[in-house]
Amino acid sequence: MKNYTCKLALTFMLSLAFTASLAQVKVDDAWIAATVSVQKSSAAFMKLKSEQALTLVRASSPAAGLVEVHTMNMEGGVMQMRPLKNLVLPAKQLVELKRGGTHLMVMDLKQQLKAGQSIPLTLTFEVAENNGQKKNIEQQIIVPVRSLTDAMAQPAEAAHQH
């Protein structure tokens, strides 16, 4: 009986590790726009790709009071920005958070973001497990702060982030 219990516990731990490893999201070209001293918000951009379907359900940073997924669309000739409740990452498909489109809005900044600094971001993804239950997986990344002009001039491979 003791041997069976050990095997069962080991199988459970391996399945948790397997689920967590599958949920790892590849993050490339992550950056956040520098701000001026009175500015209380910025935007973060990146490319996300996962081997399995996931949903980005939350983002946070100790540098900000609030981080939300936002989208921008032209409506009646006017650019409209709106928060999204979540962001679906289809399996094996690149999802790009970019200027003029879907991005992370980093609000209620605690201090000015200066080019050359980096800020931590925690991305929380919801993943469906084999048993049909949903589980949240957190992934922490460090995002470099760049001026808009530097970020636009920099080759993509130089901004590589995992």
Image (tube, rainbow, N blue to C red):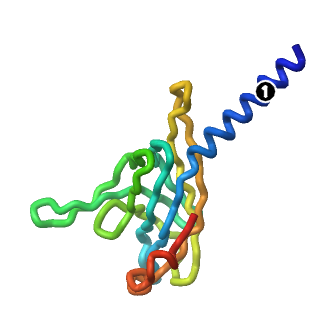
Relative horizontal placement of residue 115, taking residue 1 as reference (left or right): left
Q: Is residue 105 above or below residue 52?
A: below
Which residue is rendered at x = 56% and y = 45% of the image? 23
Q: What percent of the width, then of the height, locates residue 45?
A: 43, 67
Q: What amino acid is found at the position of numbered circle 1 in the picture?
A: Ala
Which residue is rendered at x = 52% and y = 82% of the image? 114
Relative horizontal placement of residue 119, taking residue 35 as reference (left or right): right
Q: Is residue 28 above or below residue 131?
A: below
Relative horizontal placement of residue 149, taking residue 8 as reference (left or right): left
- Which quadrant would residue 95 be assigned to in this image? bottom left
Which residue is rendered at x = 60% and y = 58% of the image? 140
In the rendered image, the quadrant that contains the N terminus is top right
Q: Is residue 3 above or below residue 44?
A: above
- Which quadrant would residue 13 be assigned to in this image? top right
Q: What percent of the width, then of the height, locates residue 92?
A: 44, 49
Looking at this rendering, what residue extends furthest in the top direction? Answer: 1
Which residue is rendered at x = 58% and y = 62% of the image? 141
In the rendered image, the quadrant that contains the C terminus is bottom right
Helix, strand or loop status at disc 1: helix
Question: Circle 1: is it few (<14), some (14-19), or many (20+) Cα within 10 Å?
Answer: few
Which residue is under mark 1? 9
Q: What percent of the width, then of the height, locates residue 135?
A: 56, 36
Q: Along the line of sight, which residue is nearer the eye, 24 or 36?
A: 24
